[in-house]
């Protein structure tokens, strides 16, 4: 569900024509829909109504301050993976008590900051981290509330590079060692053991791996409690997938809805009487964002037609990084009778990897035409870089009939100014 539709033959974000935004800010740009963001957050939060729940939005999926502020207004907490993300969450007024800190490599400085802020929970991913955190907290005369991320060893499908819950993945503590590490944690001076955490992967479109993992982790909570660990929270991570194919027919079944997901979780975890913590990212922002680009050239190669766009892998790296699929549609609505033809969609960067799609069926697109990459809200703008000295892609938020630039496009002069030539050159 999203709010990017054709009206009067032109693609709109809510009530704003994307061509109007393009005229104002240039291309390429990301555009997010406030209505979609609110809707997705509410649907997820409402699915757990009546249950003690913290929805800690995964800041890494889309971390723009305006988006965080919008979600904070809806009551969102934050799942952060760095001091930078923690500062973002605090900057928009997300209370420290709604912040959880994940990630395999927290530094001493990051631990110190999070303890000073008084965050809700650290999700600890290894024994060295546990010992370090206890030491830092003790030195500060504080105690860190922790959950240990356990690795339930389920394979959640999806792309290899976004699977996280298997034995060979770098995340969490192995299932076999969990009880032993909890026993150790319980006796550490700077540590309060409060929860168990899992996150089995991303873009999971089937309930079965969730059911498997959540059932396993529920048993673990019971075992740990019996061993004297006062587990009062269960962090079930993020990972619920979204549809990336909208118009074209495909064999992929639709991902579970939040209410189906919630029903499964309630059935499994109800007897535990715990606070449930969730860290959804993609599910909230994925379909709430698009990337709009302009066609620089239509190039007819010997065997293929290329649409050369002014967006590139530095603006949206998902296709190059994990073969991600993004639906691409013209901003000007094609005629119902328009003939489809296969094209390769590429960017101007000097890498063969700078290819968004090969042999994609598209209606006719001409030089100068705008196209929109759908479902680009999550892991899009946040992974953008300035490779090839292409200025960081700007971000725009629409809300009804208004829109605002929420991150400006830097000028090339801005980029050059950050660099320093030493005197001795
Ligand atoms: C990335 C991540 C998430 C968010 O995953 P989504 O698939 O975007 O919902 C949640 N928790 C942790 C620990 C993560 O690393």
Image (tube, helix red, strand yellow):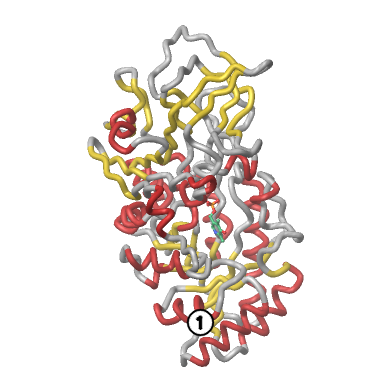
Measuring from the top left, give residue 423's x and y in whole percent: 48, 69
Q: Is 319 or 152 nearer to us in this picture?
A: 319
* Residue to which mark 1 is pinned: 144
The answer to which quarter of the image holds residue 343 is top right
Q: Quadrant of ligand 1?
A: bottom right
Q: Residue at x 50, y 69 (%)?
A: 101
Q: Is 132 or 199 nearer to us in this picture?
A: 132
Sort mark 1 into few (<14), some (14-19) or many (20+) by Cα contacts within 10 Å: many
Q: Is residue 42 left or right of residue 201?
A: left
Measuring from the top left, give residue 401's x and y in whole percent: 23, 35
Eyeballing the image, is 64 above or below 170?
above
Eyeballing the image, is 242 above or below 87?
above
Q: Residue at x 62, y 41 (%)?
A: 320
Q: Is 197 or 375 nearer to us in this picture?
A: 375
Eyeballing the image, is 196 above or below 381?
below
Q: Quadrant of the N terminus?
A: top left
The answer to which quarter of the image holds residue 103 is bottom right
Q: Is residue 132 left or right of residue 378?
A: right
Q: Is residue 262 visible?
A: no
Q: Is residue 130 visible?
A: yes
Measuring from the top left, give residue 20's x and y in whole percent: 28, 30
Eyeballing the image, is 179 above or below 357?
below
Residue reaching furthest front?
424
Q: Is residue 420 left or right of residue 413?
A: right
Secondary structure beneath label 1: strand
The answer to which quarter of the image holds residue 52 is bottom left
Q: Residue at x 52, y 30 (%)?
A: 327
Q: Could you tell me how many numbered marks the image carries?
A: 1
Measuring from the top left, give residue 262's x and y in whole percent: 50, 51
Residue reaching furthest top?
337
């Amino acid at each position: 569900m999203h709010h990017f539709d054709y009206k009067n033959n032109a693609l709109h974000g809510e009530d704003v024509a994307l061509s109007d935004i393009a005229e104002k800010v240039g291309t390429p740009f990301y555009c997010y829909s406030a209505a979609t963001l609110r809707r997705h957050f509410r649907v997820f939060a409402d699915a757990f109504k009546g249950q003690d729940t913290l929805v800690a939005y995964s800041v890494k999926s889309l971390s723009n301050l305006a988006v965080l502020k919008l979600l904070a207004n809806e009551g969102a907490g934050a799942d952060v993976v760095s001091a930078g993300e923690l500062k973002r969450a605090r900057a928009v007024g997300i209370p420290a008590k709604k912040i959880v800190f994940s990630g395999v490599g927290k530094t001493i400085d990051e631990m110190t900051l999070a303890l000073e802020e008084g965050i809700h929970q650290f999700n600890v991913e290894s024994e060295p981290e546990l010992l370090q955190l206890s030491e830092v907290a003790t030195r500060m005369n504080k105690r860190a509330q922790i959950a240990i991320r356990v690795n339930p060893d389920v394979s959640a499908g999806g792309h290899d590079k976004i699977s996280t819950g298997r034995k060979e993945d770098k995340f969490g503590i192995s299932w076999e060692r969990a009880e032993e590490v909890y026993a150790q944690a319980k006796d550490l001076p700077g540590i309060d053991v409060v929860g168990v955490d899992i996150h089995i992967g991303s873009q999971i479109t089937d309930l079965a791996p969730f059911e498997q993992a959540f059932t396993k982790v529920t048993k673990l909570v019971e075992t740990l409690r019996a061993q004297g660990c006062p587990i009062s929270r269960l962090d079930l991570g993020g990972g619920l997938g979204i549809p990336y194919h909208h118009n074209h027919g495909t064999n992929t079944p639709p991902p579970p809805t939040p209410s189906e997901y919630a029903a499964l979780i309630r059935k499994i975890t109800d007897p535990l009487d715990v606070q449930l913590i969730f860290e959804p990212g993609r599910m909230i922002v994925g379909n709430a964002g698009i990337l709009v680009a302009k066609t620089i050239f239509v190039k007819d190669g010997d065997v293929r037609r290329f649409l050369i766009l002014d967006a590139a892998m530095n603006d949206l790296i998902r296709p190059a990084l994990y073969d991600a699929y993004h639906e691409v549609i013209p901003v000007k609505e094609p005629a119902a009778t328009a003939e489809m033809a296969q094209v390769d969609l590429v960017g101007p960067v000097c890498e063969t990897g700078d290819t968004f799609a090969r042999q994609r069926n598209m209606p006719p697109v001409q030089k100068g035409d705008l196209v929109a990459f759908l479902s680009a809200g999550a892991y899009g703008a946040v992974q953008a870089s300035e490779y090839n000295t292409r200025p960081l892609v700007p971000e725009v938020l629409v809300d009804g009939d208004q829109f605002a630039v929420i991150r400006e496009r830097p000028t090339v002069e801005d980029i050059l100014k950050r660099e320093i030539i030493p005197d001795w050159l």
